[in-house]
Amino acid sequence: MTFEIKINDKLSLTIPTTEESQNIYEIIDKDRKHLREWLAWVDKTTSATDIENNIIERIAKFEKKEAASFYAKYEGKWIASVGFISINDKDKQGEIGYWLSSEFEGRGLMTECVRTSIKYGFKELGLHRIVIRCRSLNIKNSAIPKRLGFTLDGTLREDHKSEDSYDDTLIWSLLDREWKE
Ligand SMILES: CC(C)(COP(=O)(O)OP(=O)(O)OC[C@H]1O[C@@H](n2cnc3c(N)ncnc32)[C@H](O)[C@@H]1OP(=O)(O)O)[C@@H](O)C(=O)NCCC(=O)NCCS
């Protein structure tokens, strides 16, 4: 393991070593139907080598402070990915992205992971603004920034092409002073 934030006794955020590639690949592989609806990379992820390359990229970007994207572990099992998929150091902004294995939905686990990522972003990365982008059709996705006190900045109209239609993207943001309050 290269980096870990412990949220509590059961839940932690980690940048793992590549030895975990197969274990992480397996949770994605068994949950393709749930994940592919919202995540374009799922169908392009076809072997543990893809996850190995992803871990190598996460480590490199973390070291350069270009991203801080973690995998989440719950009771010893990999369950999710969450964290800063991009960091803009000039404007002190970071964008959080996430997915959670369907088996673990509905318990507030991702909300806790995002809450911890926000704290890490403001306290450790010195960010001023955190953004979460959600497709308007993805109600469970937007519920997380809403629950955590983000403001809806606006809507990018029809900027996402699905098979036979276009849908909107919602931009949610939280500023460091709002988080402290
Ligand atoms: C988006 C996604 C992470 C949301 O998962 P989730 O399980 O709804 O989120 P949480 O783990 O925070 O759980 C919240 C749910 O647990 C419930 N809950 C139970 N205890 C809770 C607690 N202590 N705190 C917060 N919520 C709690 C909430 O009421 C909510 O349930 P509801 O949707 O029935 O109201 C998940 O659906 C997912 O990964 N989807 C596919 C990928 C995706 O869409 N990613 C985002 C796009 S990039």
Image (tube, rainbow, N blue to C red):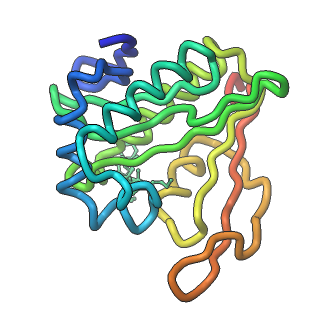
Can residue 178 be seen here? no
Instruction: Tell me the quarter of the image containing the C terminus.
Output: top right
Find residue 104 and report its horizontal and vertical position in percent.
24, 48
Identify which residue is drawn at 57% across, 39% down: 96
The total number of labels drawn is: 0
Q: Is residue 25 above or below residue 69?
A: below
- Residue at image x 51%, y 49%? 144
Q: Is residue 115 left or right of residue 33?
A: right
**Quarter location, residue 111:** top left
Front one among 44 and 40: 44
The image shows residue 95, relative to residue 158, as above or below, that is above
Q: Position of residue 101 (x, y in %)?
A: 27, 50
- Is 24 left or right of 156, judged from the image as shown? left
State the image coordinates of residue 162 (x, y, percent, origin top left): 54, 78
Position of the N terminus, as image quadrant, is: top left
Q: Position of residue 174 (x, y in %)?
A: 71, 38
